[in-house]
Image (cartoon, rainbow, N blue to C red):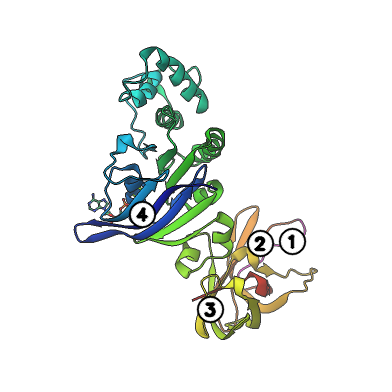
Amino acid sequence: MKPLIELTGVQKFYGDYHALRDIDLTINEGEFFSLLGPSGCGKTTLLRTIAGFEGVSEGSVMIGGKDMDGVSANLRPTNMVFQSYAIFPHLTVAENVAFGLRKRKDIAKSDRPAMVEDALKMVGLAGYGDRAAHALSGGQRQRVALARALILKPKVLLLDEPLSALDKKMREQMQVELIRLQRHVGITFILVTHDQEEALVMSDRIAVMFEGEIGQLDDPETLYRRPKSKRVAEFIGKMNFLPAEVTSASDVIALDVAGLGKCEVPQEQAPGGATVGSGVVGIRPESLGILFEGETTDRQLVDAVVDEVVYYGDMTYYDVRIAGVEEPITISMKNMIGRPVLDKDDQTQVIWDARALVVMP
Ligand code: ADP
Ligand code: MG
């Protein structure tokens, strides 16, 4: 993997407001990279410093081994697609896409129609050139914006919440198309999103941001399975938290988990590090189970009472209470033939396994 974008010690202040805090970040050639975080955490600001719409207060931005200090946005090998489609409704599709070429005096007028058609083909709009932009659907407009950004073959495409204005179905369809498009053109995509599912589905790697800082940078599976902190775990999917006492933190970590009891886990299950003393363990709803009548398990069991049942058709989510834990614990179970759906106040047994625990500071 070859580094393409390298941010070192990047700080950004808006007056007194510290919007980016000491960002060190390397993004590789051909990578589908996502910036994920709650609204206001600095995702757009970070994207704009890469694009050159925003200068940095301290630190450096390098693209392709060149320092971008003083290099204006239109001279950088990047192009940006915005949340709002920002296409011109009174122009045709082809005119909108050709707009991406307006500053390129070096490209002959006669070459432009073929370039426009190529770009439209890339986004699945071949033959749409003569249509009026205002007559397009939301998904089609976003494709026009993509074609306009891709026509100059940038090294990096910056996408600031490009799908957030679309309805759920269209958004899921465009996610698949964006992945296909990125593989096809092979350039680096940097996607900004506040939607954790979107980031997990689409990205090679994800940087999770909070308050101007990167909380964790990993591939989707590592982020989901091995969150380094409680706030990352809370932001990505659903996680139960149980108080735990760490009694030893050498080669293996010895724990006494509230409601579950004593167990040992390897160091990998404490990605954020572990120290002796009180801490917390995380456990995903799908890593716990309910022991139904007639079923057996070789895993650990603990008595529980059903507190809440939410039926999703394919899945049922149970909130259960176990002795020694204040908050109910959520368990997701696949609904299967022969497996009943329990009711509130039913007595049951919860299946758990130390391999599914994540120890957090
Ligand atoms: P995100 O894209 O993650 O929602 P932004 O990068 O847009 O967040 O904003 C991060 C923080 O910086 C916010 O608190 C926002 O109010 C502030 N901010 C962004 N742009 C400016 C600006 N031009 N002037 C002052 N504050 C700004
Ligand atoms: Mg934003």
Residue 37 visible? The answer is no
Residue 202 in the image: x percent, y percent? 54, 46
Secondary structure category for the residue under label 3: loop
Marks 2 and 3, how far apart at CA: 30 Å
- Which residue in the structure is indicated by mark 4? 39
Q: Amino acid at mark 4?
A: Ser
Check if mark 1's residue and mark 2's residue have beta carbons within 8 Å: yes
- Residue at horizontal 42 percent and vertical 55 percent from the top: 25
The residue type indicated by label 1 comes to Arg
Write down the residue under mark 3. Answer: 274
The residue beneath circle 1 is 339
Mark 1 vs 4: CB contact within 8 A? no
C-alpha distance separating marks 1 and 2:
10 Å
Q: Amino acid at mark 3?
A: Ala
Residue at image position (34%, 21%) is 106
Q: Position of residue 53 (x, y in %)?
A: 28, 42
Q: Is residue 272 above or below residue 62?
A: below
Chief secondary structure of the magenta portion: loop
Task: Give yes or no for contact between labels 2 and 3 (Cβ–Cβ under 8 Å).
Answer: no
Which tag, 1 or 4, sits closer to the chain's start?
A: 4
Q: Mark 1 or 4, which is nearer the eye?
A: 4
Residue 308 lies in quadrant? bottom right
Nearest the camera: 40 or 270? 270
**Which of labels 3 and 4 is toward the front?**
3
* Residue 64 image point, x, y percent: 42, 43
* Foreground disc of the pair 1, 2: 2
Q: Is residue 341 magenta?
A: yes
Q: Is mark 3 within 8 Å of ligand 1?
A: no
Of callouts 2 and 4, the N-terminal one: 4
Q: Which label belongs to residue 333?
A: 2
Question: SS class of the residue under badge 4?
Answer: loop
Please report the bounds of the magenta region as a residue range. 337-344
